[in-house]
Amino acid sequence: MMEIEELQFLTPDLTRNIANKFGTPVFVYSQSEIENRCDIALGFPNAFGLTVRYAMKANPNASILKIMHKKGIHIDASSIHEVYRAIAAGFEADRILLTSQQSPTEDELKDIISKGVSFNACSLYQLELYGKIFSGNEVSVRINPGLGSGHTAKTDVGGVTSGFGIWHESIDEVKEIVKKYNLKVVRVHTHIGSGSDPEVWKAVSKYTLEYAEIFSDCEIVNLGGGYKVGRMKGEKSTNLSIIGEPVKKEFEEFFKKHNRKLKLEIEPGTHLIANCGAILSEVMDKIHTGKKGYEFLKLNTGMDANTRPSLYGSRHPMITVAKSGEQGEIKDFVIIGHCCESGDLFTQQMGGELETRPIRDANIGDFIVMEGAGA
């Protein structure tokens, strides 16, 4: 039987106070938890220096960005819009790296490069475009190393099924473009997906360092992010110290062989923010579907606020906070959102099938806290 979940950084009294002051639904974040996650990431084992870039697509909230900035975190922007949002939140342009599936326009590229933003070419086309405009400049290249490690097919961004990055067998074409425009490849970037196997990260480090060896100007190796986050009881999060040690050793071995000290970059997104945020919602209705059916709680929020359950079949902790302060008995409910869509279902299995969730009984007007909603 699934265990009943508990509040993580909120308390029942604080939940009621926030709901009374701001109404529901409302996102709530813990600054101290965000700062703690930043400290953990900044402690990632490294041999010759580390830069932690927040993958801000996880949550581009301006207040969160400002906390990250104060902690010394840099930015991984996945669109031109994120670049400008990060700058508006106070980030210096030279702390931003743009890695985008959608190529910026020529005018956009000229604007952000003039400001000091770094550009990571994710395709041969992007590299060629950059070279035509900025001949002789520094550039980064994103390589698809031929393997991935996502926790679902939708979060696996490496290997033959992924259109992210320049396919590793095209490295000679990269060299040709670099030579043609006298570019300096100062950073080699890979990103394989949401995995937590230390052996996979060791292998990716080794492969990426081999690409870095090809480019004599390379000073930085960026291994991306995608560190698994456990939200429910029993789910494990990636231990950055454990996966970081074999990565550190690969960098040390590279130095012994080539006398080059390369700096490491990582790009955690969800790992920094997921369990630092919650959605405070309210039960707006209760229905049942008979003796052979289910009892449903309808919330005043839905897939428009948290798409993960509908998109990935993901589970989030759900905790009842009664308005009265009295705890109800534990019952099995199906919890659904307010969107007129059968997929707006918060209690489902990984494959998308409906399941019940044991939580404290809730009446109309009581609060349901959805944890792990920071990303």
Image: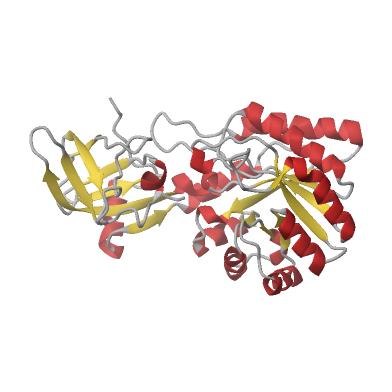
The reply to whether residue 12 is in sight is yes
- The residue depicted at 64 percent of the width and 64 percent of the height is 91
Asked where in the image residue 172 lies, by quadrant, the reply is: top right
- The residue depicted at 30 percent of the width and 29 percent of the height is 3
Between 29 and 159, the one lying in front of the other is 159
- The residue depicted at 39 percent of the width and 51 percent of the height is 307
- The residue depicted at 77 percent of the width and 31 percent of the height is 250
Q: Tally the marks.
A: 0
The reply to whether residue 261 is in sight is no
Q: Position of residue 9 (x, y in %)?
A: 39, 45
Asked where in the image residue 295 lies, by quadrant, the reply is: top left
Between 163 and 74, the one lying in front of the other is 163
Q: Is residue 190 left or right of residue 88?
A: right
Q: Is residue 102 left or right of residue 219?
A: left
Between 171 and 16, the one lying in front of the other is 171
Q: Is residue 343 left or right of residue 248?
A: left
Q: Position of residue 265 (x, y in %)?
A: 71, 46
Q: Position of residue 74 (x, y in %)?
A: 66, 55
Q: Position of residue 22 (x, y in %)?
A: 30, 64
Q: Quadrant of the N terminus?
A: top left
Residue extending furthest toward the right: 259
Color encoding of the figure: secondary structure
Between 214 and 218, the one lying in front of the other is 214
Q: Where is 1 relative to 152, above or below?
A: above
